[in-house]
Amino acid sequence: MPRSTDGCDACPIAPTRRDFLRDVPVAIAAIVASLGLSRNAAAQMPVSWTTAIKSVNAARTFPIPPADGAQIDKKNEIILVRWQQSMYAFNLSCPHQNTALRWDANTHRFQCPKHHSRYEPNGTFIDGRATRGMDRLTIALDGANITVDLDHMHKQDVDPAGWAAAVVHIP
């Protein structure tokens, strides 16, 4: 069998029936468990869902989160991260094969559920099949808000200066 060009010979193109049957009970258990959380426990989780409070062309504006953690805007496919007095905006997809990334609250890391690539809260690649950090979006401070420019995504290996500059420091 010829070797694939992306170095991922064993990667299935789509989930198999076995994968589906294996993952469904876990998903159901997670939903049931989340329904049992109290309001206080849910409020203390470092990951939450968000939506833009303002949209102008390709820019989306979000309130600055009050504490460290991750917020996900599924509609716009953005992950916002406040971490150690810095804000980042990332593309929701893993740079390896575009699978939606997940935040692991226990380790304070992002992980790709498909091939288990792991990333620091600032998007730096740790290990796994990916070969670079998470894709950062241009971000700017706008008073008490953060504005994310969806038209300017920076890949760590192609645009290292833009990737490094795509951060806002907050007090």
Image: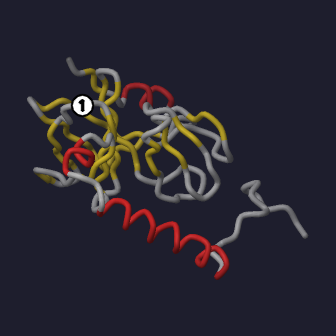
Which quadrant is the C terminus positioned in? top left
Q: Which residue is mark 1?
A: 67
* In the displayed structure image, the side of residue 147 where residue 45 appears, left or right: right
Q: Residues within 10 Å of mark 1 (few under 14, many from 20)?
A: few
Picture residue at 14% right of the left edge, 53% below the top: 55
Instruction: Name the spot of residue 59 as percent of width and height, x first.
Output: 20, 48
Picture residue at 44% right of the left edge, 33% below the top: 121
Rendering quarter of residue 118: top right
* In the displayed structure image, the side of residue 63 where residue 133 appears, left or right: right
150 or 125, which lies in front?
125
56 or 113, which lies in front?
113
Instruction: Name the spot of residue 5 as percent of width and height, x first.
Output: 76, 58
Which quadrant is the N terminus positioned in? bottom right
Instruction: Name the spot of residue 12 as percent of width and height, x first.
Output: 70, 70
Q: How many marks?
A: 1
Rendering quarter of residue 83: top left
* In the displayed structure image, the side of residue 68 where residue 18 appears, left or right: right
Does residue 169 sit above or below 10 in this rendering? above
Picture residue at 41% right of the left edge, 52% below the top: 92
Does residue 120 sit above or below 49 in this rendering? above
* In the displayed structure image, the side of residue 62 where residue 29 appears, left or right: right
What amino acid type should be assigned to the residue bearing mark 1? Ala
